[in-house]
Image: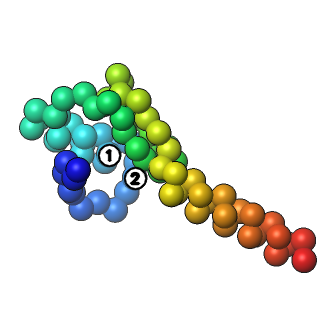
Amino acid sequence: MLLSLMAGSKEDTETVSAFFQDMRARDLNDLLLVVSDGAAGIIKAIETCFPRSARQRCLAHRMRNLSAKVLDESFRNS
């Protein structure tokens, strides 16, 4: 379910926190689960704005990152 959409060019804690605070101001309750990529700014904003919510790393991002790493290493060893 799409909860909000905002244009932005950075994934820093300040920008993402502002995004989350806007949703909280519109009566968004605590979330059970927040899924994100591994960007440090996003993770910190989730921990700050939704301290009681569980956080999970996006499996699609994780698989893409692992796949790229395995491919890079196999090409280096060839």
How busy is the neighbourhood of tag 1: few (under 14 within 10 Å), some, or many (20 plus)? many
Q: Position of residue 75 (x, y in %)?
A: 82, 75
Place residue 74 in its image quadrant.
bottom right
71 versus 18 height, above or below: below
N-terminal of the two: label 2 or label 1?
A: 2
Check the image and report above or below for 7 versus 58.
below
Dot 1 amino acid type: Val
- Indicate left or right for 27 with 70 as reference: left
Instruction: Give residue 38's position: percent from left, percent from top.
Output: 52, 48
Residue beneath disc 1: 16
| Vertical arrangement, residue 29 with respect to residue 78, above or below | above
Mark 2 and mark 1: Cα distance apart in space: 6 Å
User: In the image, what residue occupies the spot 58% across and 62% down?
Assistant: 64
Residue type at mark 2 is: Glu
Indicate the secondary structure of the residue bearing disc 1: helix
Q: Nearer the viewer, residue 29 or 42?
A: 29
Residue 11 disc label: 2
Residue 71 location, quadrant = bottom right
Query: Does the residue at mark 2 contact the one at mark 1 (Cβ under 8 Å)?
Result: yes
Q: Classify mark 2: residues with Cα within 10 Å, few (<14), some (14-19) or many (20+).
A: some
Quarter of the figure that contains the C terminus? bottom right
In this rendered view, identify the residue nearer to me: 41 or 52. 52
Please indicate whether residue 27 sits to the left or right of residue 77 in the image.
left
Residue sitting farthest toward the right: 78
- Residue 35 lies in what quarter of the image? top left
Q: Residue at x 75, y 64 (%)?
A: 70
Instruction: Give the residue drawn at x 30%, y 40%.
Output: 17
